[in-house]
Image (tube, helix red, strand yellow):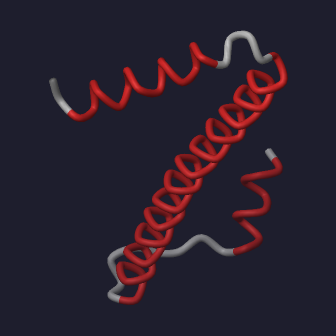
């Protein structure tokens, strides 16, 4: 039996031993909710960081293309007009 399976069984046995203790079960539930929240926040943070880095890379590529004359950048006035419409 793998170590993961043994750990899962051990955790389940510990939870089963708490079934008669409502206070312990509430604490366990609260702790599990905190763990889930932390996990989802970490995932979102990693995704957000990657998205921001991709946006920065794209912006730098456009800037490089504009400096070499391959692309003409939009003026701030044109940009504001575009996002308002």
Image coordinates of residue 43 in percent, x first then y, are 53, 47
Specify whether 26 is left or right of 52: right
Image coordinates of residue 35 in percent, x first then y, are 63, 41
Residue at x 66%, y 74% (from the top left corner): 75
Which image quadrant is residue 5 in?
top left
Count of residue discs:
0
Specify whether 61 is left or right of 6: right
Considering the image in quadrants, where does the C terminus appear? top right
Residue at x 28%, y 32% (from the top left corner): 4
- Find the residue positioned furthest to the left: 1
Image coordinates of residue 60 in percent, x first then y, are 43, 78
Position above or below: 47 against 40:
below
Front residue of 62/70: it is 62
Residue at x 35%, y 78% (from the top left corner): 65
Specify whether 62 is left or right of 1: right
Image coordinates of residue 29 in percent, x first then y, are 72, 26
Residue at x 35%, y 31% (from the top left corner): 7
Specify whether 9 is left or right of 11: left
Which image quadrant is residue 64 in?
bottom left
Front residue of 56/49: it is 49
Position above or below: 55 against 16:
below
Position above or below: 20 against 65:
above
Front residue of 5/20: it is 20
Considering the image in quadrants, where does the N terminus appear? top left
Front residue of 31/67: it is 31
């Amino acid at each position: 039996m793998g170590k993961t399976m043994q750990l899962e069984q051990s955790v389940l046995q510990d939870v089963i031993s708490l079934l008669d203790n409502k206070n312990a079960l509430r604490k366990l539930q609260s702790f599990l909710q905190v763990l889930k929240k932390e996990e989802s926040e970490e995932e979102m943070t990693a995704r957000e960081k990657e998205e921001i880095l991709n946006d920065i890379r794209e912006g730098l590529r456009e800037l490089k293309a504009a400096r070499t004359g391959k692309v003409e950048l939009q003026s701030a006035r044109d940009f504001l007009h575009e996002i308002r419409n």
